[in-house]
């Protein structure tokens, strides 16, 4: 059973969180392109697609921590330090995504659609997206190194 | 907005809970519990996320979707009623 739970957990992490990282990182750059007066054709049209990828795969990504908890509990490692730190960092990343990145993207889309200035919104969104990606990278490294665990690399 | 993904999540939420409780009451296979436990938790959280996305944080549907087991289906019905209201009903969220 451990193998099934772990396989679903890793598969969901790759398939769901990967696209969110990539698409969210592209949003500020595309917004800057769309905002230029001699803007690249189609940049404004790509923004809603990128935002939709983030929204949809954020929901699919719920499977990652849930099956991660299932795996850890079934393997009996739920109270190990690296797991607890990962849980806290994952909670932080989920909070940043749901409360800062996705609302920021929505605000940016609305601003671009109405032709308002998007400098400040874009900068803030780029920062929060960077924080999300950094948190996610730290959790991924923790999953591989597993400090304090006897099975670490 | 479509309520089909919400309905799917809500159905998985209810069906997995029914199987989990049936397993608990009868054969009590640990394999079934550890497979369906995360699936149920996942469906419950996905149903909440989809409801919040469609109806907003402070809505009747969001309050309903927090109910364990049948919450997703109640929320799906509530969202659909809001989107496609029967005649003579108010369309605003309470």
Image (spheres, coloured by chain):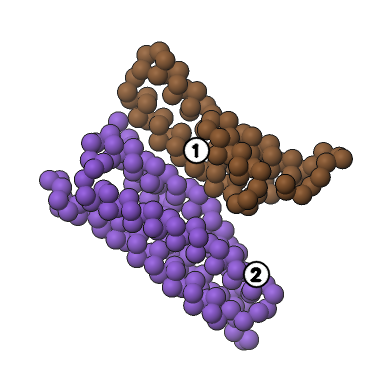
Chain colours: A purple, B brown
Secondary element under disc 1, as helix, strand or loop, is helix
Q: Looking at the image, which residue is at 15% across and 47% down? A: A149
User: In this figure, which residue is indicated by the disc labeled 2?
Assistant: A110
Determine which of the numbered discs, if any, sits on residue A36 in the image: none
* Residue B72 quadrant: top right
Q: Is residue A132 above or below residue A65?
A: below
Q: Is residue B40 left or right of residue B87?
A: left
Q: Position of residue B94 (x, y in %)?
A: 72, 46
Q: Please, which residue is most extreme toward the left here? A: A150
Same chain for mark 2 and mark 1? The answer is no
- Give the chain letter at badge 1: B
Q: Is residue A143 above or below residue A77?
A: below
Q: Looking at the image, which residue is at 37% across and 26% down? A: B33
Residue A72 appearing in the image: yes
- Give the chain letter at badge 2: A
Q: Is residue A75 left or right of residue B22?
A: left
Q: Position of residue A46 (x, y in %)?
A: 58, 68
Q: Is residue B2 left or right of residue A47?
A: right
Mark 2 and mark 1: Cα distance apart in space: 31 Å
Q: Position of residue A29 (x, y in %)?
A: 50, 75
Q: Looking at the image, which residue is at 63% across and 74% down? A: A112
Determine which of the numbered discs, if any, sits on residue B43 in the image: 1
């Amino acid at each position: 059973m451990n193998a099934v739970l772990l396989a679903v957990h890793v598969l969901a992490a790759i398939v769901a969180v990967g696209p969110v990282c990539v698409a969210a990182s592209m949003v500020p750059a595309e917004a800057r392109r769309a905002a230029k007066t001699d803007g690249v054709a189609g940049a404004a049209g790509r923004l809603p697609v990128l935002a939709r990828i983030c929204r949809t795969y954020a929901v699919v990504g719920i499977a990652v921590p849930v099956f991660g908890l299932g795996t850890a509990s079934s393997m009996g490692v739920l109270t190990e330090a690296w797991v607890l730190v990962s849980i806290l960092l994952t909670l932080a990343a989920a909070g940043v995504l749901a409360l800062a990145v996705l609302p920021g993207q929505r605000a940016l889309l609305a601003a671009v659609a109405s032709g308002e200035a998007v400098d400040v919104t874009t900068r803030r969104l780029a920062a929060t997206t960077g924080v999300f990606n950094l948190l996610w990278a730290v959790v991924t490294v923790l999953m591989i190194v597993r400090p304090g665990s006897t099975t670490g690399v | 907005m479509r309520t089909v993904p919400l309905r799917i999540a809500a159905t998985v939420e209810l069906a997995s809970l029914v199987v989990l409780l049936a397993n608990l009451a009868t054969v009590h296979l640990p394999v079934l519990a550890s497979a369906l436990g995360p699936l149920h938790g996942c469906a419950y959280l996905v149903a909440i996320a989809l409801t919040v996305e469609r109806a907003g944080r402070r809505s009747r549907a969001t309050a309903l979707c927090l109910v364990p087991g049948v919450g997703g289906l109640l929320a799906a019905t509530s969202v659909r009623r809001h989107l496609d209201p029967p005649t003579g009903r108010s369309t605003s969220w309470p």
